[in-house]
Image: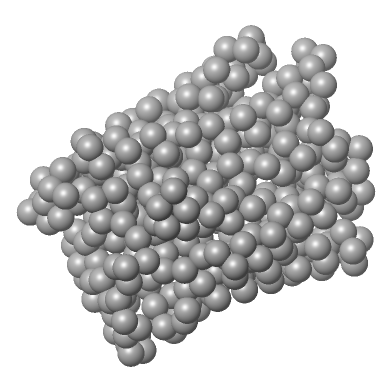
């Protein structure tokens, strides 16, 4: 294996292990609800606190240009180790919601040094196959996000602490792999001077912002679906006598299949064009959001099949928005541009994650996901405009 693909494969593995901490608390919400007497708001905040921490961390990194001025290797690895420590502290020290939210915030804050920085490292190794490489990374991140549900199904159904411990151990392993094996590639640029005005330049770049609006449409849907699909499965399966373990297994499969979608879409986007793949993916995911609720409380196999399609499509486009920004933004501030994109996206997720519980209480699970289709529809419009612009020739070696 070439040094390039050995490094990228280890980077993807490291990202997968690090992201296991993201949903480590969300995966055991039913147990924490009983032990800590959580209401709907408390359950939502267990996920939202991570999102807020990530947004604050990403904006801090963006304002200080950290992703472009600090060694990517050490920023990536150190962030993974700190996220592991914040996660391990919960089963070790915490017995109520308040301290847990602080530690979940810190977990998200530190993960802001893993996800966008990993994409920057990928970009320093790739040119013609950048969509595939970033697709590999986002696919790994997706599987990592799904792993807590698998841990919950096989060991955490009666106890939540093992899930948190295992997730923390995986993130710590990520940091070690990063320190030992990961480094930037031949296309890295020299560290630029600190320049906070670069944020304004990025925000005024029409092509970059069209890709960012597409990404925002994608993020409107993604984390709300990931955060509540387990509760959706549980509510649909329970009246039919299906054990909670199978809801966790189904959730793992639906989230993890997005890893395959991300990898395949990366290859297709390099061959067919970024805008074509993102538009197609968002069209499929919007359709699933509109209609999956009508399968609620029906055939579990049919519901699971449609959810798998949704899980595949909802992530397939994710890496391509980042790849597009990496091709459109100034190269010397690539890390800043990618971090800004992800921070805006995760800021938006706070709204949609929190909105699902009151919508479900008002109209039930049959219609709770319908409003999520709005995001990809706006994303399709923005990527179509980018496709028709002259800047689109910079994407995927001229493939729009």
Q: Residue 254: x and y, percent? A: 58, 30
- Residue at point 71%, 28% (across, down): 249
- Residue at point 16%, 43% (across, down): 399
Quadrant in the picture for residue 173: bottom right
- Residue at point 85%, 40% (across, down): 156
Q: Residue furthest top?
A: 299
Placement of 142 over or under 58, stated as above or below: above
Placement of 35 over or under 373, stated as above or below: below
| Image quadrant in which the C terminus is located | top left
Q: Residue 48: x and y, percent? A: 63, 57
Residue nearer the viewer, 274 or 50: 274
- Residue at point 73%, 19% (across, down): 237
Residue 368 is left or right of residue 344, and the answer is right
Residue 150 appears in the figure: yes
Q: How many marks?
A: 0
Q: Residue 14: x and y, percent? A: 58, 56
Q: Residue furthest front?
A: 1
Residue 99 is left or right of residue 8, and the answer is right
Residue 352 appears in the figure: no
Q: Residue furthest left?
A: 390
Q: Residue furthest bottom?
A: 193
Q: Residue 188: x and y, percent? A: 32, 72
Residue nearer the viewer, 394 or 54: 394
Q: How is the image coloured?
A: one colour
């Amino acid at each position: 294996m070439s040094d390039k693909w050995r490094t990228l494969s280890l980077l993807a593995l490291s990202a997968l292990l690090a992201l296991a901490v993201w949903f480590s608390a969300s995966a055991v919400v039913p147990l924490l609800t009983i032990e800590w007497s959580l209401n709907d708001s408390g359950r939502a905040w267990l996920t939202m606190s991570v999102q807020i921490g990530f947004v604050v961390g990403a904006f801090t990194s963006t304002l200080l240009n950290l992703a472009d001025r600090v060694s990517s290797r050490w920023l990536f690895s150190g962030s993974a180790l700190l996220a592991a420590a914040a996660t391990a502290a919960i089963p070790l020290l915490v017995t109520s919601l308040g301290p847990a939210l602080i530690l979940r915030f810190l977990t998200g804050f530190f993960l802001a040094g893993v996800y966008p920085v990993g994409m920057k490292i990928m970009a320093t190794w790739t040119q013609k196959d950048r969509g595939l490489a970033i697709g590999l990374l986002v696919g790994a991140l997706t599987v990592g996000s799904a792993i807590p549900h698998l841990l919950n199904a096989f060991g955490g159904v009666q106890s939540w602490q093992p899930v948190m411990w295992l997730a923390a151990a995986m993130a710590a392993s990520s940091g070690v792999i990063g320190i030992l094996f990961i480094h930037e590639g031949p296309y890295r640029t020299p560290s630029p001077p600190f320049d906070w005005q670069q944020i304004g330049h990025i925000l005024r770049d029409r092509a970059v912002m069209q890709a960012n609006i597409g990404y925002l449409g994608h993020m409107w849907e993604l984390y709300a679906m990931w955060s509540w699909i387990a509760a959706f499965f549980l509510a649909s399966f329970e009246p039919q006598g299906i054990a909670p373990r199978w809801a966790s297994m189904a959730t793992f499969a639906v989230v993890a299949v997005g890893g395959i979608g991300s990898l395949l879409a990366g290859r297709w986007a390099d061959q067919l064009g970024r805008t074509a793949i993102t538009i197609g993916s968002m069209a499929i995911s919007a359709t699933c959001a509109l209609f999956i609720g009508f399968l609620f409380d029906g055939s579990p196999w049919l519901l699971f099949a449609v959810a798998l399609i949704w899980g595949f499509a909802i992530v397939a486009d994710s890496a391509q928005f980042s790849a597009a920004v990496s091709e459109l933004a100034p190269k010397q501030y690539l890390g800043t541009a990618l971090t800004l994109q992800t921070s805006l996206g995760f800021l938006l997720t706070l709204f949609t994650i929190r909105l699902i519980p009151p919508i479900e209480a008002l109209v039930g699970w049959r219609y709770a996901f319908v409003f999520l289709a709005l995001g990809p529809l706006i994303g399709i419009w923005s990527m179509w405009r980018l496709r028709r612009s002259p800047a689109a020739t910079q994407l995927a070696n001229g493939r729009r």
